[in-house]
Image (tube, rainbow, N blue to C red):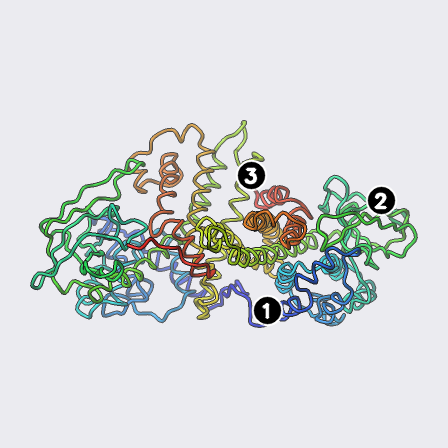
């Protein structure tokens, strides 16, 4: 019995944290955030160099062969930095291929995903908030796919799309294929740009294990979002401590006031207590298949919700400046909003977790 | 991360479980008074090395090598069997560890063993009418006259004072010293002449705590723990143990499971309440808090086992604030489920936690008690100060000079 992360896992976090601090400080993040594309090829190249293109992919395919727990730890650090990159979609697509792909599909794509020669993403949401595998409705016909997907992350950068289709199945579509149309949408979170993707008889391949693994892929994605929010919330707490520790009113630092100190203590208590839930839910994906779906739903609902509350408090404690475009709070605030809603709001996840608990 | 118990621990759990088959007692022993039965079974647990593991054998403990996993298994199994293990009373859980850490040899020999055995019971004399969160402003005086301390003053919120044999408490012995430096930690016989105990009636209807008045009460000079004027530091050790008590995750697990049961047993719109969408949302939200707390408990356990407590200061310091808040959420939802049944006053038994779980009156009393435990052992706003100042490095409050 050992409930904690290992020294190697701490080192993994420290390595990625060092990279994020050096290569994506808030000043640089701001440039990408305000930029046209929302993408920084050099930053992404550095992430790939660290192995973030294939953390959980098998070493046979050039991946690092790590667990979902390791992935969650990395996702947390990327949330701390609100790092703009195709990491989320790329990782989810990689898991779908690794778990549900045929040997040929895996051999053909996974090495290129791990190296980053191919950027992949996952197209899951459909109109009217239909994120869950049992809600997917796109139909295939003789190896072609028709229909529309929404809020696809980094779709404009992706070479390969893993698409959720009817029956909870998964299909592979190359973005260069005829009939694939990507329309960027002005998304709220400018660190993870989204697009609508339309398929009009686009050539596709089915992942043979798709409907067997779709729920598991969704659960892993829930963990990624929860961990990202945990990191984002911690950064917001740190920003708030820094700001209130220097901002002077009534002749003293704001942190000198109990109202401020207590609000920060509440944020820290709330967020730090969720860390163990995040670890457990991630570990369950690796080792406790019976508990994994429930733990993922609880972790996503709870952590993204608590992080949003912390973001709300961070904004409030920054005062009027916290409402401005110029203030960095918004970059993490919107990151938290994204994580809270993508793949289903806390309300949706709580109803799912209740059902999974047999209530 | 590895949540499997190794074979050694699986075998240990089986061993403990088998031993616990011996509770409740049977035959002639079952006819003994309950308190006597508890003392006997606890003694057997000590012989087996399951109870009071951190106390030396010389003082009535079982002196085991520290092993947090074994301790957790023992706690879980004893809780499951509702068997008397480590006593949760203030003597065994707070005073005895304090004496072990800071008492004289004579004090340890005289008090620890009978306290652990349940032969001497204790109450805590800290708070006063004018000294709550600002405990160090306490005014009850103890003056050394010859070889005795003579005590005058007034303590309040003294749980079980009416049943206790002794009090451990804080008294002002150096009135000229700055407030924290003028306090000593004394042990007082509750049968001593000049002590008057008046029960306080709580809003639950029960009387768990009291006021204690001291009128020239005498206690021997050697009944001081630590040096004169160092009582404040001694009391910090005791409070640390009290916070651990309140943050007990087993306690929360029982409350959470009991709430789920209530939601299953309660009807809403002709269906079990647990099927009602809004109740499910609230339950699931509570589950998020509950799982966070439960796994944080496991995280702290592992950090202790690895000797890495320094890495978990923040989660450790937030346990009480988070736990008491969760308990309030749980009991509040119970009120929503009970609806009009929560309008009936709890019986005295229900108000003093002597009643079976799950009764409406027990829930109503628990709702009120849940707010009380967020005050006991350091009120939530004091916790927030501690978290801010000691874990997050925020500045200390400005203090009004005296």
Q: Looking at the image, is B339 positioned above or below residue A94? A: above
Left or right of residue A227, residue B56 in this image: left
Q: Chain of mark 2?
A: A
Q: Give the residue pinned by disc 3.
A: B280
Q: Residues within 10 Å of mark 3 (few under 14, many from 20)?
A: many
Left or right of residue A76, residue B92 in this image: left
The reply to whether label 2 and label 1 mark residues of one chain is yes
Query: Residue A147: which disc?
Result: 2
Q: Looking at the image, is A138 positioned above or below residue A223? A: above
Q: Cα distance, mark 3 to mark 2?
A: 34 Å
Q: Chain of mark 1?
A: A
Q: Position of residue A176 (x, y in %)?
A: 89, 57
Q: Nearer the viewer, mark 1 or mark 3?
A: 1
Q: Are marks 2 and 1 in contact (CB under 8 Å)?
A: no
Element marked by disc 2 = strand
In-front residue for pair A32/B29: A32
Element marked by disc 3 = helix
In-front residue for pair B288/B24: B288
| Quadrant, the C terminus of chain A | top right
Q: Are marks 1 and 3 in contact (CB under 8 Å)?
A: no
Residue at position x 80%, y 54% from top? Answer: A155
Query: Residue A9: which disc?
Result: 1
Q: Position of residue B382 (x, y in %)?
A: 38, 52
């Amino acid at each position: 019995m050992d409930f904690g992360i290992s020294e190697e896992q701490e080192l993994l976090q420290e390595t990625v944290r060092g990279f994020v601090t050096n290569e994506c400080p808030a000043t640089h993040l701001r440039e990408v955030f305000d930029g046209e594309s929302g993408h920084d090829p050099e930053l992404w190249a550095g992430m790939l160099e660290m192995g973030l293109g294939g953390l959980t992919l098998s070493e046979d395919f050039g991946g690092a062969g790590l667990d979902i727990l390791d992935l969650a730890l990395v996702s947390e650090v990327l949330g701390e930095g609100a790092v703009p990159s195709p990491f989320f979609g790329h990782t989810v697509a990689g898991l779908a291929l690794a778990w549900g792909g045929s040997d040929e599909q895996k051999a053909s794509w996974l090495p290129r995903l791990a190296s980053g020669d191919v950027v992949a993403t996952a197209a899951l949401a459909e109109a009217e908030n239909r994120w869950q595998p049992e809600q997917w409705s796109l139909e295939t016909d003789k190896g072609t796919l028709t229909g529309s997907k929404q809020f696809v992350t980094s779709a404009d950068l992706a070479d390969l799309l893993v698409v959720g289709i009817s029956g909870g199945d998964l299909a592979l579509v190359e973005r260069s294929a005829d009939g694939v149309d990507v329309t960027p949408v002005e998304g709220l979170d400018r660190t993870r740009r989204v697009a609508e993707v339309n398929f009009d008889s686009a050539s596709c391949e089915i992942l043979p294990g798709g409907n067997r693994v779709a729920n598991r892929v969704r659960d892993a994605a829930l963990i990624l979002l929860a961990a990202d929010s945990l990191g984002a919330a911690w950064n917001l707490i740190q920003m708030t401590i820094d700001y209130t520790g220097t901002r002077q009113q009534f002749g003293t630092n704001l942190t000198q006031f109990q109202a401020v100190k207590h609000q920060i203590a509440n944020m820290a208590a709330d967020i730090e207590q969720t860390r163990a839930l995040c670890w457990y839910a991630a570990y369950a994906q690796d080792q406790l298949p019976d508990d994994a779906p429930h733990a993922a739903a609880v972790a996503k609902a709870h952590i993204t919700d608590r992080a949003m509350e912390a973001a709300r408090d961070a904004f409030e404690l920054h005062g009027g400046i916290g409402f401005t475009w110029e203030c960095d709070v918004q970059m993490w605030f919107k990151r938290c909003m994204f994580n809270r809603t993508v793949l289903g709001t806390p309300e949706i996840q709580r109803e799912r977790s209740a059902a999974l608990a047999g209530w | 991360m590895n949540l499997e118990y190794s074979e050694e621990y699986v075998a240990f759990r089986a061993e403990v479980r088998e031993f616990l088959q011996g509770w409740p007692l049977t035959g002639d022993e079952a006819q003994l008074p309950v308190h006597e039965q508890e003392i006997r079974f606890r003694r057997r647990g000590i012989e087996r090395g399951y109870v009071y593991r951190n106390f030396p054998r010389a003082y009535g403990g079982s002196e085991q090598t520290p092993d947090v996993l074994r301790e957790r298994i023992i706690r879980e199994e004893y809780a499951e069997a509702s068997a008397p293990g480590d006593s949760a009373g203030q003597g065994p859980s707070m005073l005895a560890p304090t004496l072990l850490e800071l008492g004289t040899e004579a004090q340890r020999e005289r008090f620890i063993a009978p306290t652990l055995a349940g032969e001497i019971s204790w109450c805590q004399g800290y708070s006063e009418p004018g000294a709550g969160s600002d405990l160090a402003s306490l005014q009850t005086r103890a003056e050394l006259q010859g070889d005795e301390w003579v005590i005058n003053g007034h303590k309040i919120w003294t749980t079980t004072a009416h049943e206790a044999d002794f009090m451990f408490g804080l008294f002002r012995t150096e009135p000229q010293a700055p407030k924290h430096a003028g306090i000593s930690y004394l042990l007082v016989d509750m049968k001593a002449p000049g002590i008057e105990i008046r029960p306080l009636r709580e809003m639950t209807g029960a009387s768990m705590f009291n006021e204690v008045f001291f009128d020239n009460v005498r206690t021997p000079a050697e009944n001081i723990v630590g040096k004169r004027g160092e009582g404040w530091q001694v009391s910090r050790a005791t409070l640390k143990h009290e916070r651990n008590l309140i943050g007990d995750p087993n306690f929360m697990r029982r409350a959470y499971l009991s709430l789920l049961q209530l939601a299953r047993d309660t009807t809403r719109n002709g269906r079990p309440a647990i099927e009602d969408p809004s109740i499910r949302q609230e339950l699931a939200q509570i589950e998020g808090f509950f799982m966070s707390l439960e796994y944080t408990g496991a995280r702290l356990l592992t950090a202790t086992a690895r000797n890495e407590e320094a890495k978990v200061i923040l989660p450790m310091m937030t346990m009480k604030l988070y736990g008491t808040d969760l308990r309030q959420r749980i009991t509040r939802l119970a009120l929503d489920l009970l609806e009009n049944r929560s309008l009936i006053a709890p019986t005295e038994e229900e108000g003093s936690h002597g009643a079976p779980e799950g009764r409406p009156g027990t829930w109503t009393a628990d709702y009120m008690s849940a707010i009380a435990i967020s005050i006991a052992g350091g009120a939530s706003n004091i916790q927030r100060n501690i978290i801010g100042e000691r874990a997050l490095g925020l500045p200390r409050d400005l203090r009004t000079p005296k």
